[in-house]
């Protein structure tokens, strides 16, 4: 049987409210009979990810969180003169490769249905590959094939 040690540490932070809940109130925890501010690991990780030191050390390898990857491809098609509805159809396979595609019956924006329902994490190299494919599709005026879309997705290429 494996033995685990669980540590609960009190760490002093400067006077700042680093972490709030969905209502805007500070997150708290009662510890040792006293109410203390709580800082979640999610909050700490975000602070690390957005720090200058992190960006300098991992420049060019930091991933992007977006639900609009296929929308960017569709925008390239629209900018090259292809109709917005056609552009959304052309990039449908790209969007499906990264996640479940939005299917808004009455979108406010024509390119909304080129977005994914949830955020996806992609590397800068994957993002450049999507844009390169979109430029090729714009030149050839055709939709992306499933095979082309599958080539875009690479596992664990980005940090973060």
Image (tube, rainbow, N blue to C red):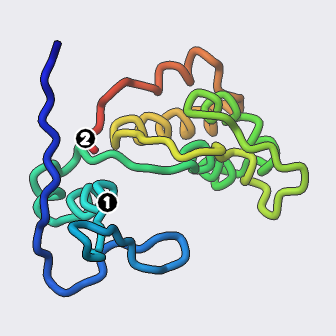
Mark-to-mark CA distance, 2 and 1: 21 Å
Q: Which residue is mark 2?
A: 159
From the image, which quarter does the C terminus lie in?
Answer: top left
Q: Nearer the viewer, mark 2 or mark 1?
A: 1
Residue at position x 49%, y 37% in the image: 130
Q: Residue furthest bottom?
A: 15
**Rendering coords of residue 43 (x, y %):** 31, 62
Badge 2 vs badge 1, beta-carbon distance below 8 Å: no
- Residue 38 vs residue 96: left or right? left
Disc 1 crowd rating (10 Å Cα; few below 14, some 14-19, many 20+) is few
**Rendering coords of residue 33 (x, y %):** 25, 72
**Rendering coords of residue 117 (x, y %):** 66, 45
**Rendering coords of residue 100 (x, y %):** 66, 35
Q: Which residue is mark 1?
A: 40
Front-lying residue, 41 or 60: 41
Residue at position x 20%, y 59% in the image: 48
From the image, which quarter does the N terminus lie in?
Answer: top left
């Amino acid at each position: 049987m494996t033995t685990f040690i669980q540590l609960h540490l009190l760490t002093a932070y400067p006077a700042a409210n680093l972490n709030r809940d969905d209502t805007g109130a500070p997150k708290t925890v009662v510890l040792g009979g006293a109410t203390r501010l709580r800082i979640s690991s999610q909050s700490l990780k975000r602070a690390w990810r957005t720090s200058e030191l992190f960006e300098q050390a991992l420049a060019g390898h930091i991933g992007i969180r977006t639900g609009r990857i296929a929308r960017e491809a569709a925008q390239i098609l629209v900018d090259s003169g292809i109709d917005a509805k056609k552009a959304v159809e052309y990039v449908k396979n790209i969007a499906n490769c990264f996640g479940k595609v939005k299917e808004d019956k009455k979108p406010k924006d024509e390119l909304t249905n080129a977005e994914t329902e949830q955020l996806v994490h992609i590397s800068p190299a994957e993002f450049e590959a999507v844009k390169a494919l979109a430029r090729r599709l714009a030149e050839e005026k055709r939709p992306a094939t499933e095979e082309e879309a599958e080539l875009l997705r690479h596992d664990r290429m980005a940090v973060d």
